[in-house]
Amino acid sequence: MGHRENDHIDIVGRLLKRGVSRRDFMKFCTAMAATLALPAGFATKIAEALEKARKPSLVWLEFQDCAGDTESFLRANKPTVAEIVLDVLSVDYHETIMAPAGKQAEKSRDDVVKHQKGKYIAVVEGSIPTKDGGIYCCIGGRSALDIVREVCGNALATIAVGACAWDGGWPAADPNPTGAVGVKDAVRGITLINLPGCPMNVENLTATIVHYLTFGTFPATDSHGRPLFAYGERIHDHCERRAHFDAGQFVRQWGDEGHRKGWCLYEMGCKGPETYKNCPVIRWNEGTNWPVGSGHGCIGCAAPRFWDTMTPFYKRLPKVPGFGIESTADKIGAGLAAVTAAGIAVHGIARAVKGKPKEKETTE
Amino acid sequence: MNQRLRVYAWEFPVRFTHWINVLCILTLSVTGFYIGAPFIHAYSSKQYIMGWMRFIHFTAAYVFLMSVIIRLYWAFAGNRYASWKIWFPFSSDRWRDLVNAVKFYLLISRKPPYAVGHTALAGLTYLIVFLLFIFEIVSGFALYSQAHSGALWTLLGGWLLGIMHVQTIRLFHHLVMYVLLVFAVLHVYIAWHLDTVEKNGLMGSIFGGYKFVTGKEWE
Ligand code: HEM
Ligand code: SF4
């Protein structure tokens, strides 16, 4: 691993050697154009750009994470997207998959930061603890906060992958014992692209990088810094079960007739109606399937603070704050109605017992 | 009791929006409840039950919005019984009336709260009710704006998504329905109770606009 910023990749040549045909390469470019919501004609443009691209270095940092995004990254396999991505990028530092270890590994990271200042791409996975001086996550004797500030602060751009790197994710869920935050709150004033989700979908990471290699810019983002091509539309509006929603056909119990027939999972707590992501379109594992397709409701993993806001995952509405665990909005509603009825009954009886106030009595 | 004066208290826009609101709230509650917990099962995917419920909910929502706007306009353009001022019973006189009214409803006092228009307590209640109406509209349009992006919907409620989490908005949109339904039941009961005590034609007044005044209102 070294400084290969000037290497042209001759990507097609290399892929041919690995048994990936030009046709497969073009298919990949077409898929990328589609993911990025670009007109089909852009596939050629992407192909040309990738053929000419210089290999940007990539530093992949892992903090308070489960390596789920790394898993997602390594499973990239649209005509071996993994090979294309790994060939297009020079992954100079990635704790989980790199060969060097210990001091040597730290050196590869420091080299990139030193020699390629402002030219490499930083990818961050996992949240960054800030409580007690950030001691809850240290690598090579340095705190995550320290590392992320140095590495992201000197990068061309940072891509925060997964819910944790975006807004703290799981570690930041109430009561957030480590004071975990995402990159956006740990380092200010950097070019940051957020790819939330638990985990992020590698197709969106690939598409974001391909966009950069093709156009020299990162894709347009929303107010949360999420690329619009991936987070611009609601799951519910592209869901294959939507017709069942509109019809009124709902799964009511796991394994019931509706579940076997693939009806809508709304009543099982599906959060598709409040979650923005392109899962129903690009799906997962080479487009094989996605959670709702396989019969489980969306848990809203790409939504802000999803662990706190989208739970309970199997109920439509959150718990009512300040009431017991079991209280739902409807139970409280029923309670209110009962109290009202009782109040009226008591009032009516008292009124009858005390007798109607007489007109005369009220005039003095 | 001998001399009864007929007073035109509730002008047409007040009565009109009152009944539109009744219809809208009933419709919005039934369809909204279905949206929250779909209680009718479709037997064929050719049906469109949720589709219609949502369509009716959204149509009623626009009617309700217009009705609330008209009523708010009338709070400035209408007579003194319709004025926005009745919603703020915070002068010392009105405050005393308010305490007396509470005592009356708790059956502690037998002196009914006389007023040609709204009593102080009623005024304050309607302030809260109108705020709840506005909350339902804003939170409803916030939910609506998730699938319908556009400046109009952002203005009507979409901005709330930037302040509150959408699930919290949904929860309160749902809970406030119950609060409004409880209000409706109490409202009818109290109107009937007052009518029988004061014999001032209160129940009829929301249909025809006229109330009877016996002079006690100015004591
Ligand atoms: C008195 C007024 C209203 C009542 C009582 C009411 C009631 C409800 C209820 C109970 C729900 C179900 C919430 C849930 O459990 O998920 C709901 C959903 C909804 N309401 Fe209302 N609502 C009212 C006014 C409005 C208004 C003015 C709008 C404006 C457009 C609106 C738009 C919506 C939307 C968009 C949904 C969600 C529909 C969906 O997810 O498909 N509501 N309403
Ligand atoms: S399964 Fe979920 S996302 Fe799909 S239509 Fe039903 S509620 Fe919407």
Image (tube, rainbow, N blue to C red):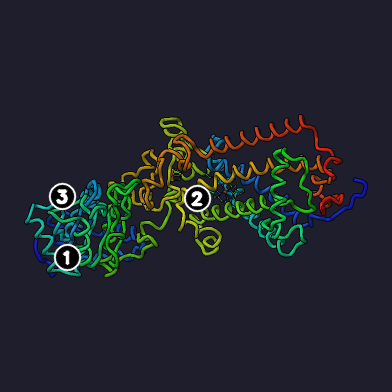
Q: Is mark 2 within 8 Å of ligand 1?
A: no
Q: Is mark 1 within 8 Å of ligand 2?
A: no
Pointer 2: residues within 10 angstroms few (<14), some, or many (20+)?
Answer: many
Give yes or no for contact between labels 2 and 1 (Cβ–Cβ under 8 Å).
no
Type of amino acid at the residue the image marks with label 2: Ile
In the image, taking residue A264 as reference, residue A189 lies left or right, namely: left
Mark drawn on residue A96: 3
Q: Look at mark 1 in the image and give the residue it sits on.
A: A55
Q: Quadrant of residue A345?
A: top right
Q: Look at mark 2 in the image and give the residue it sits on.
A: B169
Q: Residue at x 29, y 68 (%)?
A: A189
Chain letter of mark 3 equals A
Q: Quadrant of residue B76?
A: bottom right
> Do marks 2 and 1 share a chain?
no
Q: Quadrant of residue A91?
A: bottom left
Please, is residue A228 above or below residue B22 in the view? below
